[in-house]
Amino acid sequence: MPIEVDIITNTGTLLAVLISLRHDIYRAAVGFFKGLVSKQARKEDDWHLAILVILGSIPTAIIGLLLKPYFESLNTPFYVSIALIVTGLILWFAPKTANKSKIKDISFKDALLGGIAQGLAVIPGISRSGSTITAMLWRDINPELAARFSFLMYLVVSLGVTIMSASDLKEAELGLGVLFAMFLASFITGFLALKLLFYILKKGQFKIFAPYLWLVATITLIKLLLF
């Protein structure tokens, strides 16, 4: 698959997250810059949110850079199917409810563990959002807050990947019309998927994604076995 497909679809999803979490992004950005010049601002939740996102993104970047070369060879239907089964188990046993519902309730340790979980998603077939949100849930963080924090960390990593990969578009094999169509499709599906995800998390039904993952993995494994 041409590299531009990954870049364009990632950019579409990135824009969907930017729009969906625009209020949180604004809070974190303003809080960060205020905190740089004001000691009082560093006591506020917005500064705390910004630092948590930055802190959580560090282990993600380190793990991704160190382990990605080792796991690229596992990007095959068999290994991805096994990883999908593991992802399903992660979602199935995720806690339904949690008590921490405010930004100030998230500790630096919570952020680091969330970042580690996100970094391990470099393994093909392991869901980035699924593993990160589940890690937050196990840390007793409210499902909606866990999802918001998870996608804020995703933004940092995804934005970095998009910037680093932008130069590859100069050698794109596909036409601009095709690339725009893929961008639009990824943006729309990403935006709708976020709406659905937050709705499901509010209902405490995160595990309903697990049977779908198991079904896909089973069909793939059967196909590999028979054909």
Image (spheres, helix red, strand yellow):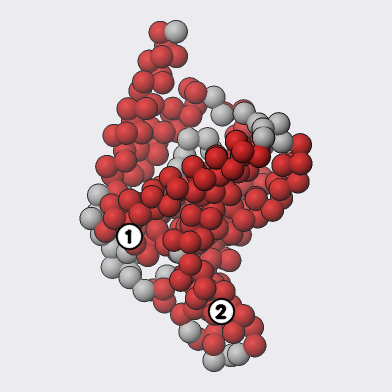
Identify the residue at the far front of this view.
Answer: 177
Secondary structure under badge 2?
A: helix
User: Does any portion of residue 97 appear in the rendered image?
Assistant: yes
Instruction: Say which label, 1 or 2, has the lower sequence index.
Output: 2
- Mark in front: 1 vs 2: 2
**Crowdedness of circle 1 by 10 Å Cα count: few (<14), some, many (20+)?**
many
Can you tell which mark lies on residue 65? none
Residue 37 is situated, as x and y percent measured from the top left of the image, at 64, 88
Which residue appears at 71% of the width and 48% of the height? 166
| Residue 127 occupies quadrant | top left
| Disc 1 to disc 2, C-alpha distance | 25 Å
Residue 197 vs 83, above or below: the answer is below
Residue 146 vs 222, above or below: the answer is below
Which residue appears at 62% of the width and 28% of the height? 1
Residue 34 vs 20, above or below: the answer is below
The front one of 11 and 27 is 11
Can you tell which mark lies on residue 30? 2
The quarter of the image holding the C terminus is top left
Residue 47 is situated, as x and y percent measured from the top left of the image, at 53, 79
Left or right: 196, with 220 as reference point: left
Secondary structure under badge 1?
A: helix
State the residue position of label 1: 143
**Type of residue at label 2?**
Val
**Crowdedness of circle 2 by 10 Å Cα count: few (<14), some, many (20+)?**
some
Which residue appears at 65% of the width and 50% of the height? 161
